[in-house]
Amino acid sequence: MSGRGPHDMGGLPAGKVERTEHDYAAWERRIDAMAVLLWGQKGAKKVFTVDEHRNAIESLPPADYDRLSYYEKWIHALTRCMVHRGVVSDEELSRKMAEVQKRG
Amino acid sequence: MAEAKFKPGERVRVVKAYPAGHVRTPFYIRGCSGEVERICGAFANPEELAQMRDGLPPQPLYRVRFRQRDVWPDYAGPVADVVEVEIYQHWLEAA
């Protein structure tokens, strides 16, 4: 049925829940910090809402939703939201990514 | 703020709708009936916020209590078991 994204899985079989704690990599902590700043701390300027962020994640094709890790999904969301809000363009982003890749 | 239409203790039914976009009402609870447990406050509509609009006026948010047996047809636990879900007013109708 339409309207049910890959995230909206309450009641569907999903295997066992992994309950072990794990540490976060430095890049994951950095993404988290960036997100908090972009959503806007109390009184500070908001670049976009957490709802736009959620919308971007929930719009991922199901195969990508399953394949990407938690913070990889966040990178996708931060990127899409900043493009939507005109903070960066896809063209600028592609150029920067090519630059970084060349660095190796 | 939009006026709160329901009071704690009143029976409500979750609208059976399947809109596209960001929605905070879980799929599994749509169409189910339960009882208002409390009013949690009023907040900008997240469905509107997700589309870069302001989501105003704030929508009342309710905590609604459902019997597990009313949600899952094959629920085998005690009859008294409940699940509570927080649902915005525009997703609820009187039951």
Image (cartoon, coloured by chain):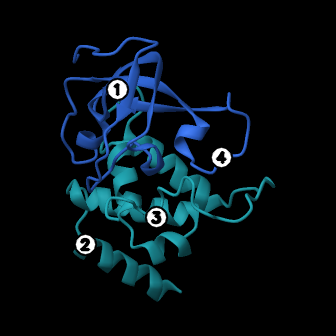
Q: Is residue B57 left or right of residue B26?
A: left
- Distance Cα–Cα, label 3 vs label 1: 30 Å
Q: Are marks 4 and 3 in contact (CB under 8 Å)?
A: no
Mark 2 = which residue?
Answer: A90
Protein chain holding label 2:
A
Which numbered circle lies on residue A6? 3
- Distance Cα–Cα, label 1 vs label 2: 48 Å
Q: Are marks 3 and 1 in contact (CB under 8 Å)?
A: no
In the image, residue A12 lies at what x, y percent?
57, 61
Mark 1 burial class by Cα count in 10 Å: few <14, some 14-19, many 20+? few
The secondary element bearing badge 4 is classed as loop
In the image, residue A79 lies at what x, y percent?
36, 63
Task: Tell me what residue is drawn at x 64 percent, y 64 percent.
Answer: A14
- Distance Cα–Cα, label 2 vs label 4: 48 Å
Task: Tell me what residue is drawn at x 34 percent, y 46 percent.
Answer: B23
N-terminal label among 2 and 3: 3
Task: Tell me what residue is drawn at x 30 percent, y 44 percent.
Answer: A47
Mark 4 = which residue?
Answer: B75
N-terminal label among 1 and 4: 4
**Is circle 2 on the same chain as circle 3?**
yes
In the image, residue B57 lies at what x, y percent?
20, 23
Eye-nearest disc, 2 or 4:
4
**Is circle 1 on the same chain as circle 4?**
yes
